[in-house]
Amino acid sequence: MRSTIQLMLKRTIANWRLLSAVIIGSILAGTIMSATVVYFESLRDIALQKELADQNPADLDILIEADQTPINNETHAELTSSMESLLLARVGKFTTDYERAMRSWTFFVDEPPELVPLGECPCRPTVAEPDSFDQNDEPLIECDCRRIQCMTVPDKPHIIDIVAGREPEINAEPSAGSDLTVEALLDEDTAEEFELNIGDVIPARPHWDEERINVNIRLTGLYQRAHPDAPEWRILDQAFGSRSSTLQIAQFVLPQQTMLEVMGVYFPNMGAEYAWFLDVEPTSIHATDTQLIRQTLEITENELRSQVDGFVLDTELDRTLLRYEIELFFNRLPMFIVLILIVLVVIYYTATLAGLLIEAQSADVALLRGRGTTSRQLLLMFAVETIIIAAFAIVCGPFLATWGVSFLGTLPFFGELNAGEALPVNLTQNVYIMAAIGSVMIMIALMIPAMRVTRQGVIAERAGRARPQRLAFIQRYYLDLGFLGVVLFLFWQLTRQGSFVASDIFGETTVNQVILAVPALFLVAAGVVLLRVFPLAMDLLGRLLTTDIVSRIVSPAVVLGIWQMARNPAHYSRVSLLLILTAGLGVFAASFAATLERSARDQVLYETGGDIRVPGISNRPGGRSFNVEEDLQDVKGVEEVATIYRLRGSITAGFNFDQFSVLAIDPDEIGEVAWHRRDFTRDGYEAEFQAIAFESDEGIPLPEDARFLTARIKPLFPMPNVRFVARLSDANNRFYSVDLGVLLPESRSRQRFPCALEYADPENDEFPLPSWCRIGTSLQPAPFGRERVLLPIGPLKLHSIGVSTFDGSLNSGAVDIDAISTV
């Protein structure tokens, strides 16, 4: 063993120049392979921080809502302790702080409502049934749009400033024979809107069933928000904010003890809405944590939704991270191709250096074999050298890679990545894995030629020097042409498939790794095939240089060099292939920039469908009708607007259940707005969409003074579960349904349109005899099925009538219709 070590040291000293080049090349190879991972992860972190920075910071914060009924100290402690312990354990790593607040159910103002002319009450529809009439017999309706809510503010010092009055005191219990009176604060703007002053008492009546029907709220002070832009106010603005544009809601601030120990005890059936605000710190989120954070939010939401009533988790963080991951999924594909090319070039570069090192020592190895050294001893010496070289690469490579990548950010060419600052880098596990892969490749590249050389004797070594093989192993057996054929077949598959991305049998998006490597494999195959032409090219060039005319111009040294390359092409082909791969990598990386830019643009347009998309527009409950297209066309810079409606439906037939998607468009407008690409349709969207165009029914106009819609009907037999429904639209083309009554028959508005039902046996019959009856209802839409309530704007139109049931079980039947009219 000692002699082996001495021999290894002597050989190392004797070949220190070439061995130093191999060590430096191996370290450089490990550094480049590690740097690819460090650089791509740095780009991922920069892209993630840019994606997070483009969002409103308040939208990234987590807002959680939950309901609790009833509210008291016990239920409050149980809910808050369970929620906050779980939330802090799950999301505490990327959040800095949390706040909590609560809000009671809504109270009515217990004062007589004002009578106003029809159409002048903002919270009641223009087609409402009148409550009274004035002297001129004009209809009047009761109008009181005021509502009251009690709430707490986040327990944070200096969150509000009391500008007038004092803080409210905690009331223990109501005095004997009187209603409960609690003290509260109110913001200045709401107090001015309600015309309230300090010391005023507002009677409030709960909207739910309670034994006690009244509570008095005494206003003790007015407040302002100390920091209006503070993120914790999102609890009051979003979670507790008014969802109605027609109601006036006064939110009185009470101490938490008053809410739990006084209000909660006085109204035992009263519930409250809780809200938590968690401040997310975007800088604590790294690209490697995005999937884990999304899964944590999803698991937490699913778990708490099944345990807590009214649980809602509202944040744009999960959607932002998902959007980032989708963009990263497609953008990292070309980066992965470049990575494959870099790894191939680095591995081949290392193998070339290893081959040159082993060939330089082949004479010494043959001499040692002739002096009695065994192949095992020689192989052990090469193995020790290989391990030392690989150790240098795996130790130095990651640190040099992180320093080099970080320094790139300060260079002018990379200055836009991080505003001229050093790039953010991290020594992650993937960096060391890539360095380890590079070290293993180095060991393999060194040991394969070493195993071949250690088996040669002196005669075989000198014969190889005297007559070197003109063709390499893969060329002698035409493996290069076979490899090129396989790559061409894969390239043909890529052309037919059109993309690296495909869907598996479960519908998940996957990447075909073999097809993804086609560009790198094609570059290698083309380079290897070019090496077959290399000897012929050198031979022809040598013959050309020896002609009478050319030989007078060209130096004999050049001719001898060409002859040597033609005589021993295998020795020079390795360097030639290295140059081919390096040049191909540079050309590929330079030309791929345009592809990346077009890909990014197409991804954005494909996601939005046009220049701008405004999603999530729907009818607000209790809100007035409005025309979306007209409002958007009034925006400066908007030229064309198209409305698109998408929903999912289902069909149930016996035990069969099928789902489908519906996309509704305007064929005349969509062609001017939607983004188009030639591989979608050749002639644009107009010809495609005109195939589904048709003349729509404009409906029957109803009189402007109409308040009720009626129909005189007679069912074939009583059907108490079947409802007679009319489909209407208003001036803004907003459609809604009204329920006129059931086919008993019985009117929805029983007092105005009563039905005189006759029974053959009044004492025993459950259903009446079929008879003619006029049923009707107000033109103001009421909740029907799953539709939201809409406040229509006249004039109205009638489009259709029909029958329906809430549970969808519509059996066969018949009904006669005599007349449909308005009142």
Image (cartoon, rainbow, N blue to C red):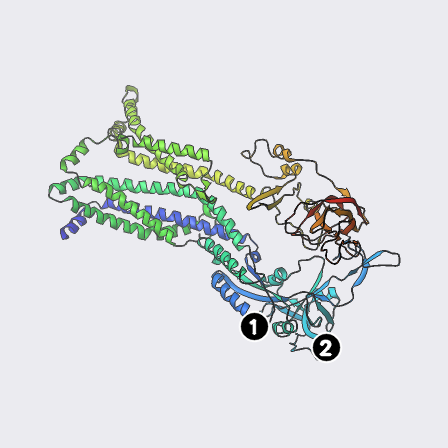
Q: Which residue is mark 1?
A: 74
* Labels 1 & 2 near each other (Cβ < 8 A): no
Front position in the image: 658 or 519 = 658
Q: Residue furthest left?
A: 371
Front position in the image: 296 or 60 = 296
Q: Judge the density around disc 1: few (<14), some (14-19), many (≥20) Cα neighbours within 10 Å.
A: few
Front position in the image: 304 or 439 = 304
Q: Above or below — where is 347 with respect to 138?
A: above
Is residue 823 shown left or right of residue 589?
right
Q: Residue furthest bottom?
A: 176
Q: Above or below — where is 218 with respect to 137?
A: below
Is residue 58 shown left or right of residue 17?
right
Front position in the image: 108 or 277 = 108
Q: Judge the density around disc 2: few (<14), some (14-19), many (≥20) Cα neighbours within 10 Å.
A: few
Secondary-structure class at tag 1: helix
For image coordinates 65% across by 78% down, the residue present is 172
Q: Which residue is mark 2?
A: 178
What x and y, as percent, mark residue 399? 35, 53
Is residue 110 shown left or right of residue 270?
right
What x and y, as percent, mark residue 204? 71, 69
Q: Is residue 526 visible?
A: no
For image coordinates 77% across by 47% down, the residue present is 713
Q: Quadrant of residue 522?
A: top left
For image coordinates 66% across by 35% down, the residue present is 693
